[in-house]
Amino acid sequence: MNQYIKDTIETIYNRYDSQPEFVQAVEEFLLSIEPVVDKHPEYKKNDLLMRLISPERLFKFRVVWTDDEGNAHTNMGYRCQFNGAIGPYKGGLRFQKNVNESIIKFLAFEQTFKNALTGMPIGGGKGGSDFDPAGKSESEIMRFCQSFMTALYRYIGPDIDVPAGDMGVSQREIGYLFGQYRRLKGNFENGVLTGKGLSYGGSLIRPEATGYGAVYYLNEVLKHENDTLEGKRIGVSGYGNVAWGIMKKAAELNAKVIYMSGPDGYIRDPDGISTEEKLNYILEMRRIDPMHCKPYAEKFNCEFVPNKKFWGVSDVDIYMPAAVQNDVGFEAAKLIGDSGVKYYIEVANMPTTNDALSYLRSCEHIIVAPSKAVNAGGVGVSALEMSQNSERLSWTAEEVDEQLHRMMKTIHDNSVKAAEEFGLGYDLVSGANIAGFEKVAEAMLEQGLF
């Protein structure tokens, strides 16, 4: 191992031993860019790696709000502006009870290189709170969002930091956040948030964008293997916007998702989750109760397996983990490897633990695609929304979809080119990391010590 990388990994373990998600993401990333570091001794002279893994700034703040009975509650809020070398910080806000500093930093770190891959001039950031919208009334969610934005607004702006939605932050929450921002600032800076409603500057197909982009990326992988998407059976974890977008686009391209999962278990629908009725029902099911997917099986008379995950089933051609980080551990990875599946396409942020990812990459029959490349379509369309806002434009759904398709093809091709340049073959994980790293590193070096 390169000594500079070894020393940097040792430092992050010592410095951030209480932040496992962040350490895991950084270690996996540093190991994959070793061929680049070997060629550039100037990185060590400029302390580039430690600068790269240290956020430029991190805000932590309390968020106090009242429930419908008038009781006060206090949550923690975060915004990590990780790296702004190539543009204003860009990344989502996540409202989920497990949110902490480690998770926010890992997400912001990953976002930096994902954003670089899009080719858009956006840096990396992420934020959120340990507030859980599930079970809260509309009024309670509105009051929380208003309090959260009151603490955050002075640190963001169209040319500073542009948050978006993430888990627990849908168009509804973005609307409340934007309304409070507008109240506090006294002007209409519609470029300060993305994921907005269409009535006030949002972009078409944004809810589906990450899922659509994942399928477009998958399609490029299949083309590389002289394969096609038509007729393919897909297993997707989750049934949120990302999984829903995968289902829609897969059906449009004559493939079908036959597995989906939720906190309560998984669904197997051999006919495919592909009709308009089924896709619309998922939206309704999610709105009423986001914690259970069993109602889908009851309505459409298909199999439901409680309290289990479907990793290891043999009747799929493609696995697409699209739910949460660390969803696939080592034992699940062995089941996936034994299933004989050829394509493992990460969609959620870091859905695979480091040991599981290493195992899957060691399986000669499996092609692994990394989440930072596969799910970049979401932030890519957010950046397109920023462009529309700044230029007072309104593109059609077809225009946005076409640009998204082109963007995902470019991300795949650039990842392949980067891997091949360093003699790594068709290594999409290393290729994506190298391509994103080289762009950010070049910008950092050209801007001096900062």
Image: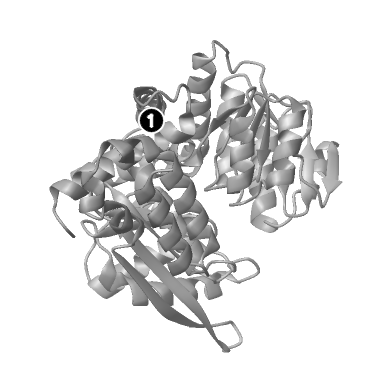
Is 359 left or right of 297, judged from the image as shown?
Answer: left
| Residue at the image point whose x is 54% and y is 56% from the top | 167
Crowd band around label 1 with a 10 angstrom C-alpha radius: few (<14), some (14–19), many (20+) = many
Q: Quadrant of the C terminus?
A: bottom left
Question: Residue 426: percent from the left, percent from the top?
Answer: 47, 22
Is residue 86 visible in the rendered image? The answer is no
Q: Residue at x 78, y 54 (%)?
A: 264
Residue 379 location, quadrant: top left
In the visual, does 233 lie left or right of 40?
right
Nearest the viewer among 294 and 31 is 31
Residue labelled with disc 1: 411
Snapshot quadrant of residue 156: bottom left
Residue furthest to the bottom: 71
Rendered-image quadrant of the N terminus:
top left
Residue at image position (52%, 48%) is 349
Of 220 and 280, nearer the camera is 220
Residue 56 located left or right of residue 416: left
**Residue, x 46% and y 57% (percent of image)?**
106
Work out whether 389 lies above or below 71. Answer: above
Residue 146: image x %, image y %? Answer: 41, 74
Give the image location of residue 54, x and y in percent. 34, 61
User: Image quarter for residue 8?
Assistant: bottom left
Question: Mark 1 is on which residue type?
Answer: Ile
Residue 330: give x, y in percent of width and height.
Answer: 69, 45
Task: Determine whether, in the image, residue 218 is placed left or right of residue 151.
Answer: right
Chosen colour scheme: one colour
Residue 212 in sight in this render: yes
In-front residue for pair 445/176? 445
- In this rendering, the answer to whether 192 lies above or below 61 is above
Q: Where 110 sits versus 214, above or below?
A: below
